[in-house]
Image: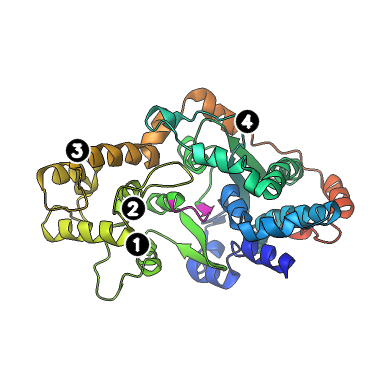
Amino acid sequence: MFIEVIDGKINGFKCKYVYLDKLFNGKLDETRGKKKVVDTVNIFISLESLFYSIRQTTIEKHLAKMEKKEIRSVYRQIISNIINVAAHYRNYFSRHRVKSNIIYYFNEVPDTESKYNNSAIWEDYRYHYYESLNSMDRMNINNMIRESIQFIRVITEYIEDVHMVGTTHVESSMVPFTFMMENYLPCNVNIIVTKDPYDFQYCTYNSLVITRQGIEPVLLTKKNLMKYLMVINELDVETTRVIHHRLLTFILACRGDKKRSLQTSKGLGFKTIYKQLLALYEAGYLLDDDPDTMSLQSLMHVFNKNGKFKYLQDAEEEIKQIIAKYHVIDFETQYRAINKTQKKQMEIQITNKTDPGALVEINERYFADYPLQLMELNQFD
């Protein structure tokens, strides 16, 4: 039963092929002349999301009762499941003769607290991340995460066009954005596999986001992003206006983010924020066809001038907090803070030491019980 729980948590990030077929609607097989319309996709997988899906008290309790041999078995199972998420997506695109670059992105787990670029705006940025992964309360699963990262790094070095990109001072969710802006791996389609609402901002940049609700995968684009958030927050999509996807960053800034140590503004749940934004639409302050009305400057100007928005109980302080959080969430603001050395540090992690023989040996030696799907990990010929 315990094994099946872990399988289910990680396998929930594998979107069924029938849903991908519906989404791409034959585009993957289209050609213009002799050239395919889509010949390359980049798939960015949030390693943090995969690990957080199993970093639970119930799993820690099970591990605490296990013998070392049993723990090692679980450790190998987790690694196999994570590698096989890449196999799942590569196999789908290989069937359509589309090349796939797969990048696992993550924040390195430091032994001492690391200062992020965002710390210049929000002093304790990601302190909770460091603290939780060094907590004795979940010692077994934390140790397993640390060791898994190292082993996954070794394995991916031998798989063609599968990479791990870790960051220390840059928020890891900026890895896909940096690759897109710097064109490190040119492609036709970007896909982000994540459970992190922070990463849902990629929908605004014409990327496909694959997330998980319960144990089921969900496909998000800019067309259905807000409807999805409405549904999971119990707002009626039939009778309530669907606001613009560009407003997600503002909503996230108001809500905060525990993992990133961004505190929630008082009394600001999703429904409250959403209703206040609806009020701005009704008052004519927000217009879907005018992006300037959705800018932080425009929204803050309205909040400063209008005292009717009752969730701003201490308006001056709340506004300062929301502005600061917005700047450490907004992709474009953060991108401007990434220096050349930090960009280069991401780029140099893209290496290929493809060695099928080494993969077979690793698979036979360590993963006999939970095999890596080596055939599915092959790029198409």
Q: CA distance from mark 1 to mark 2?
A: 8 Å
Q: Name the mark nearer the viewer: 2 or 4.
A: 2
For the residue pair 296 and 263, the one nearer the viewer reads as 263
> In the rendering, at what x and y percent does residue 233 appear?
37, 66
Compared with 163, 79 (above or below) is below
Kindly check if marks 1 and 3 are in contact, taking CB atoms under 8 A apart as contact.
no
Query: Start and end of the magenta stretch?
Result: 190-197
Q: Which residue is at a point 20% across and 61% down the rendered structure image? A: 278
Query: Which residue position is annotated with label 1?
Result: 226
Position of residue 253 relative to residue 29, above or below, is above
Q: Quadrant of residue 2?
A: bottom right
Q: First in sequence, mark 1 or 2: give its number.
A: 1
Label at residue 348 = 4
The reply to whether residue 96 is visible in this rendering is no
Label at residue 248: 2
Residue type, label 1? Met
The residue positioned 45% from the left and 53% from the top of the image is: 207
* Residue 151 visible within the image: yes
Earlier sequence position, callout 1 versus callout 4? 1
In magenta segment, residue 35: no
User: Amino acid under label 4?
Assistant: Ile
> Which of labels 1 and 4 is toward the front?
1
Give coordinates of residue 42: x percent, y percent.
Answer: 56, 49
Q: CA distance from mark 4 to mark 3?
A: 44 Å
Mark 3 lies on residue:
316
Viewer-closest of 14 and 56: 56
